[in-house]
Image (cartoon, rainbow, N blue to C red):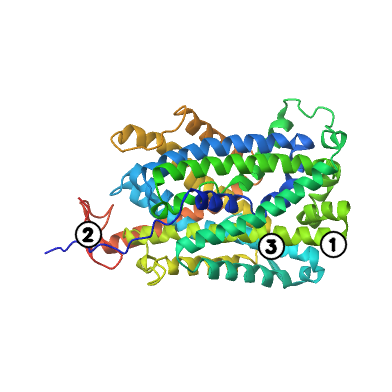
């Protein structure tokens, strides 16, 4: 006789609208905008880089509407895991896609967190130049997989990056209501950093410097669109995080109302901040100087350099401290949200069962949090550029494109599902998001190399799923509704 599984331990719905917005905003405003300003200026060839920020915000809004509809309709722990499973079939192809999503997330979430940790180390190097001393460096190329390559560098700053990750994990290792309050307090430091940068830029602003467009800046030729695509790539990386609350859907109060609002409010808040902040910086630091800085390590300290120029050396150091705080807040938010996803998949019997364990006192997924923190510490040894490149391609191909298509499939196949929030101007935002992500991919330098990396990751994940499914007699090796749960029990899924 087959026994149905007992009810699992329940997550606590302790996150309100304010905490939801804070979690999204703190993940969005990480170290990215403070180190990528020269890169986006270099890609565009001048202050017309602002088009990248504006179009990046529009792309984020379109994709945010996808997340808002799915998050309100399926407010569960795991976010995209649940969306992909329900859209593409929980007992068929959707089971494989949802497993692959969690599989890639075990790398892509630590990639995102590690980029913040490396940014912490880079700005710490402005205060303590000795942190830049490299102990060990190695550039590796795979002979098996074409031109896949990566550089590992270990320095004093690497130790700082790893310490930042450990502290973030320690703060996240507690009940979610407390973690939400920590995120809100971290947000205070984030806005302090942003506010000071904007004030310094506005009070020393030069319109002639900010809008010093080169000849032919807006001529619609091949170079313009190629530069715009590269600029949007950087802007997309910097905007990512508006969906963080969807990962904690089972812990949000009034999810049908708070998830969509927190996503859209976070995008509007961060878009306004980014555009004003970058125009302010361009009004103080000539864009040609930023363009030159894009090729050297000084690009990591652009804001501290600006504050040093305006107020002196001590101000530059204080700015570095505030930006370190901002980057740390982003790392904390990433690890907190992403740790809920393998937990949800394991609880569903579609990922390794150890990740289904909750901390007995705080009722949070401790194993997943510790695992992701450990991987993040290892990835802190890689170059920031490699981390960002791998993150962008993997996430777009294995998550964002599938969801943009999926929200339309879900509307057509499951019209009976209650949707507290329905996408505005449906299906235009979903189609626009899909077109934007494809454009970013094909306009990206070395896209073939990064596509190969994503393909290797997908093949390895598919093999892991098939081996596991065969041993457990799950789809596609056995049809029917019997699924083995996280503790080895058989669940009746009818």
Q: Earlier in the sequence, mark 2 or mark 1?
A: 1
Q: Which residue is mark 3?
A: 120
From what the image shows, is residue 413 above or below residue 447? above
Numbered disc 3: secondary structure? helix
Q: Which residue is located at x 78 percent, y 61 percent?
A: 318
Q: Nearer the viewer, residue 477 or 107?
A: 107
**CA gap, disc 2 and disc 1:** 62 Å
Snapshot quadrant of residue 140: bottom right
Numbered disc 1: secondary structure? helix
Q: Earlier in the sequence, mark 3 or mark 1?
A: 3
Numbered disc 2: secondary structure? strand
- The residue sitting at the left extreme is 1
Snapshot quadrant of residue 361: bottom left
Classed neighbour count for the residue bearing mark 3: other residues with Cα under 10 Å, few (<14), some (14–19), many (≥20)? many
**CA gap, disc 2 and disc 3:** 45 Å
Residue 60 image offset from top left, x and y in percent: 56, 39
Q: Which residue is located at x 31 percent, y 45 percent?
A: 89
């Amino acid at each position: 006789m087959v026994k149905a599984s007992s009810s699992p331990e329940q997550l606590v719905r302790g996150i309100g609208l304010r905490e939801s917005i804070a979690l999204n905003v703190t993940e969005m405003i990480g170290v990215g905008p403070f180190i990528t300003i020269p890169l986006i200026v270099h890609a565009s060839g001048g202050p017309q880089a602002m088009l990248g920020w504006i179009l990046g915000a529009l792309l984020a809004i379109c994709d945010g509407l996808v997340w808002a509809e799915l998050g309100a309709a399926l407010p569960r722990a795991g976010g995209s895991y649940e969306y992909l499973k329900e859209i593409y079939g929980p007992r068929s192809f959707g089971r494989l896609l949802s497993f692959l999503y969690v599989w890639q997330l075990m790398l892509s979430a630590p990639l995102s967190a590690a980029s913040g940790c490396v940014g912490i180390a880079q700005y710490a190097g402005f205060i303590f130049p000795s942190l830049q001393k490299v102990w060990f460096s190695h550039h590796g190329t795979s002979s098996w997989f074409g031109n896949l390559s990566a550089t590992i560098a270990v320095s004093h700053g690497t130790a700082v990056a790893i310490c930042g990750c450990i502290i973030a994990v320690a703060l996240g290792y507690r009940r979610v209501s407390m973690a939400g309050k920590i995120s809100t307090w971290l947000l205070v430091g984030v806005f302090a950093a942003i506010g000071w940068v904007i004030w310094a830029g506005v009070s020393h602003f030069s319109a002639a410097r900010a809008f010093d467009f080169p000849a032919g800046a807006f001529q619609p030729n091949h170079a313009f669109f190629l530069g715009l695509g590269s600029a949007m790539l950087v802007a997309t990386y910097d905007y990512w995080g508006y969906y963080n609350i969807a990962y904690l859907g089972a812990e949000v109060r009034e999810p049908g109302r708070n998830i969509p609002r927190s996503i859209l409010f976070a995008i509007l808040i961060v878009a306004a901040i980014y555009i004003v902040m970058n125009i302010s910086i361009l009004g103080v630091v000539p864009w040609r100087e930023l363009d030159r800085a894009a090729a050297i390590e000084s690009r990591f300290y652009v804001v501290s350099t600006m504050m040093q120029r305006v107020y002196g050396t001590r101000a530059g150091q204080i700015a570095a401290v505030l930006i370190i705080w901002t980057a740390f807040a982003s790392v904390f938010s990433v690890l907190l949200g992403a740790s809920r996803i393998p937990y949800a998949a394991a609880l569903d019997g579609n990922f390794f069962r150890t990740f289904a364990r909750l901390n007995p006192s705080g009722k949070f997924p401790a194993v997943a949090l510790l695992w992701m923190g450990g991987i993040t510490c290892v990835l802190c040894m890689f170059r920031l550029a490699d981390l960002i490149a791998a993150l962008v391609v993997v996430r777009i191909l294995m998550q964002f494109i599938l969801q943009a298509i999926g929200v339309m499939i879900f509307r057509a196949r499951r019209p009976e599902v209650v949707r507290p929030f329905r996408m505005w101007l449906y299906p235009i935002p979903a189609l626009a998001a899909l077109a934007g992500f494809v454009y970013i991919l094909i306009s990206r330098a070395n896209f073939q190399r990064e596509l190969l990396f994503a393909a290797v990751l997908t093949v390895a994940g598919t093999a892991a799923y098939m081996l596991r499914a065969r041993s457990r007699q799950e789809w596609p090796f056995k049809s029917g509704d019997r699924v083995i749960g996280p503790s080895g029990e058989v669940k009746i899924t009818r």
